[in-house]
Every structure is written in structure tokens, then in C-alpha cells.
Amino acid sequence: MSESFNRENPLVLGIETSCDETGIGIVRGRQLLANVIASSMDEHARYGGVVPEVAARAHLEAMAPTIREAVARAGIALDDLDAVAVTSGPGLAGALMVGVGAAKALALSLDKPLYAVNHLVGHVGADVLGADGPLEYPTIALLVSGGHTSLLLVRDLTSDVEMLGETIDDAAGEAFDKVARVLGLPYPGGPQIDRVAVGGDPKAIRFPRGLSLPKDMDAHRYDFSFSGLKTAVARWVEVRKDAREEVPVADVAASFREAVVDVLVTKAVNACKDLGVPRLLLGGGVIANARLREVAIERTTSAGIELRIPEFSLCTDNGAMIAALASELIMDGAQPSSLSFGADSTLPATHIQVH
Amino acid sequence: MLLSIDTSAGSSVALTRVEGIPGAFESSSADTMKHAEVIGSLMESCLTELGASAADVTAVVAGVGPGPFTGLRVGLAAASAFAVGRGIPLLPVVSHDAIGFDALEEVDGPVIVVTDARRRELYWSIYDGWCSHGLPNRVAGPSLSRPEEVPVDFEGRALTRWDASEVSAGLLGIIAARRLAAGLEFEHFEPLYLRSPDVTMPGAPKRVNS
Ligand SMILES: [Zn+2]
């Protein structure tokens, strides 16, 4: 392996293929050099959700061109790299395997060390690339996307991450997709719900907040559930339609979105208060939702919690966050992963690096 | 040197010397579930055994299938990434051709190569002998059929059936080397899934109230 392995300010290429984005990112230390994303989202639109096999096929097609583009944008040569990094999990198994196969071969072709890392912790790692200065510890991280909804306690990015809770059924992003379908709106649902919610009254309909009743709060204080909410919206709309009444789409969308946002922010702020952690970090594609950011800002401000939201291009699934996490691991002296790790679709957040 | 990678059945990687220097090394795993786990170590052991470095590889040969999707893609992702890493050509070869090569060395006359496609279906290709460049001459397939629909004759001649559960990356390397020497074109870099993804078009939302 290359003797010039730079641990001070390593040049790392990260490969992310856990869902429907083929992400290749390149960082030098904590500096972002390239963040190229090829998304297969349009191919999933007619199915109303991510189809794993369609996503995996698209990753293979996009892999070589996306690597080439990231290298060109970063203005580096592949031989200059100090390490290659890849998402080992969690995510869609078939999709992850494309990245794992590519990363192993790329690392071998360049004779560079390989770091296999955790996707969820990668979302937290994205923050080090932002302009907000170094991440302070401990911090609570709320990660919300179409694939996951997780609340993490991060005591140290490279050595101590605890999963406080996660969704027990649908991810928040999935709930947006499903409710959009109920309202006859196209995929992906998030932006569509946002669009039609304009002018709607978020208090018009009181939809249920999953796992928020006192009886649920013992076992599931930091867990989420959106499947009951989705059904409640569908039921409400159906009753209206059966009665041949007009469905107030703006009110339904605004009220549904309020229920999701309320649960997400309430549980995250609870975690901060319960654990005495005055910092909250947001990540994941659902962070694009303006109402979520608004409510998070409001409630963290009034609770005296520092809120950090990485730039949107670093919130969605991307390779830069994977490179950034590996870069932190390298700077902390972590050894490379072996060549025998696989894709782990249920990799726990406590496994920051896979050996 | 040619680095050949095939994960259409198990995982097989080979490093083949070209330009007259004898010597090839092949490293395989018959496991049909662990492609992502083994692919790196198989590649590394080929390089180590021949005392070669990645920089000695002049082209990457990729077995494009047919094969079950998830495994097949691991080898193709590895092959394309290695080629990008070194900036060298990627040479796609139909995986069945390696089995056909094997079969034609044993039997005369037309043979049908058959591999497992899972879900009670089979992949098959028909070869009627060697072409002048020493390559197995594929005259039909690769195709996907139910077991009872796999052909038993070809143009009036009975087919010898050749079932296989492994593909030799070493043979893919020899095929690629002969194609290169003969100046023949290679296939497109396109996985031969021969099946559309399993998807169901969403209907109207289901009723939730009884
Ligand atoms: Zn994600």
C-alpha cells in the first residue's frame, strides 16, 4: 500500500449507493472538492416509490461516468487519492452491493486503502464539510429521508454513536409519498405536498401523532411510526369522497405535514432536553421540507438548542458525506477495512466503520 | 495482462498473461450469495499469486451474463471501476461463451449450455463448434426459458446438453485475448439480465374504510 498515505489531510473518494442516488464525492480533509449525484428518481416515479431492482440497475450504469465526473470536477487524478470509502449499510442490499463491488475494485486498481462506513453516521459526517465550523459533541442528530427516520446521539463522530430511536414502520419520506398518492399527486411526494399545502390550515384537521401517547412513550420515546398517520389521512379523504364532498387538499396536506413535522421535532427536542444535549443536527432528504426547517428553528430557538442544518446538497444521500466520514476516521488513525466486508442492509448506527 | 471478472454464477477472477508469456491464475468461489464479500479478495489473490501489480493490468474482461441480477452486478461494478481506476479498456464477454468453450473441448457437434436463472427458469445458449479464431461459435441465445422449453435440437440436429454452475474467468480471459488478437469487436457493456425488474404498477389507492 502507498507509503505516502496522508493522515493529516487525506484526499478521499466516497461511493454511496444505499438507495436511489449514485453519489460520488471527493474531499481533502474537511474540504469538499466534488459532490456528484446521479439519481434514478425519475425511473421510480411511475411506480410511486423506489423499486430496489430499478435502483440497483441504475447504480451500475451510473458508476463509471459518475466517478469520472467527480474526478474531473475535483481537478485531481485518481492516483492522487489517499483512500477510497464506501457505504456498507444500512440501505437496499442489491443497491449497496454495486457500491461495495466498485469500491473494492477501485481501491485495488489504485493500490489504496479502503474504508467501509455507515450510511447514517455519514449523514452526520456531512456536517464537517459545512461552513458552520467544527461539530461539537455531544449532539443529537435527526436523520429523515425516504429510506430512514432515525434519532442518534453522537458523542463522537468516529467512535461513539448511539441509536436512540428509529421508525418502526414507514420512513417519513415514504409517508409523504403515500399521502401524495392518496391526494392524487405524483412522486416524489414531499415537494408535491409542500406545493399544495400553501395556503392550507395546518390546524384544520388533527391527524394522529404516531407513538406520542403517554402509553407509547415508555417503550418508544424516540421511535417513530408513520403508517397509522398515512391510514388516518386516507380514511379522512375517503369519508369526504364517499359523502361526495369536496376534499380540501390544501388543508389535508398542511395538516398531514404538520403532524409529521410535529412528531419529528418534538421527539428530537425531547431527546436534547432529556439527555442535556444543547445541539441538534438535521440530515436526510426530507430536510428539504421548508416547514420542517421552520418548526425546527422555532422550537430549538425557544429551547436554547443550537441547530445545524448542512447545505441541502449534503443532506440528501451523497458520496461526499461518505468521504467526509472516512476522512475523519483516517485523521483519527483508524485502520482500513479488510477486503471481505459485504453489504449490510441493517447495519446498526453503532457500527461507524465496518472492518 | 488481462484481469477477468465473472459473477454470473459464483464469483471467478483470473489474471491472464498475454503476448506469449505463459502463466495465468484463477481464483474462484462457488458461493452464489457472497459475491460482494469475496470479489476483492479474489482479485487481490490473483495479483499476489502472479506477483503482479494493478498497474500491470492492461484491460479488464467483464462477464456480462446471463446471470441472476444481484450477483452479476457485483462483478460488473468491480470490472468497470477497476477499468476506470487504471484508465484501461473494459472488454465485455458473454459469460456463457466460457462454458461453451469448455463444452466444445469435450463434445463434438452442437451443444446447449444451460445455467440456473432461479425462479424455476434456465438461461441457455447454443454453440455449433469453433470459429476460425478458436472461439466458440454461438448460434442462439443467451435466452431465458422454463425448463420444459429449453431446446433439444438445433436446425434438425440433436443438441448435447451441458449444464454448468460455474463460469471460469480464466476462459473468459482466453476468449478476450483471442478476440483481441483477431481484431474482433467486443459486446456492449450491458448486463444480460434477460428479465425485467419485478415491479407492480400502482393501481388506485385501496379503500381503508370498510
Ligand atoms: Zn440517507
Image (spheres, coloured by chain):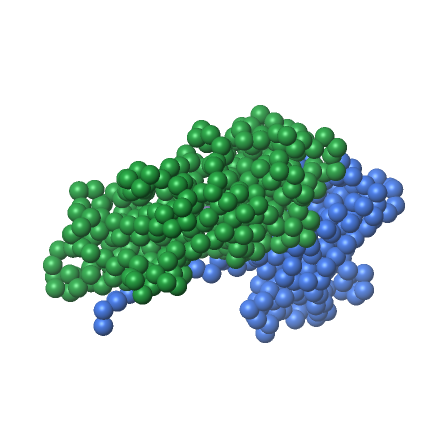
Chain letter, green: A
Residue A65 is situated, as x and y percent measured from the top left of the image, at 56, 37
Residue positioned most to the top: A75
Q: Quadrant of the N terminus of chain A?
A: top right
Is there any visible trace of residue A25 in the rendered image? Answer: yes
Using the image, determine if residue A100 lies above or below residue B58. below
Left or right side of B207 for B100: right
Chain letter, blue: B
Is there any visible trace of residue A55 in the rendered image? Answer: no
Q: Toward the viewer: B181 or A61?
A: A61
Q: Toward the viewer: A258 or A301?
A: A301
Left or right side of A239 for A104: right
Using the image, determine if residue A139 lies above or below residue A178. above
Q: Toward the viewer: A103 or B175?
A: A103
The residue shown at (34%, 61%) is A217
Residue B142 is situated, as x and y percent measured from the top left of the image, at 62, 58
Residue positioned most to the front: A276
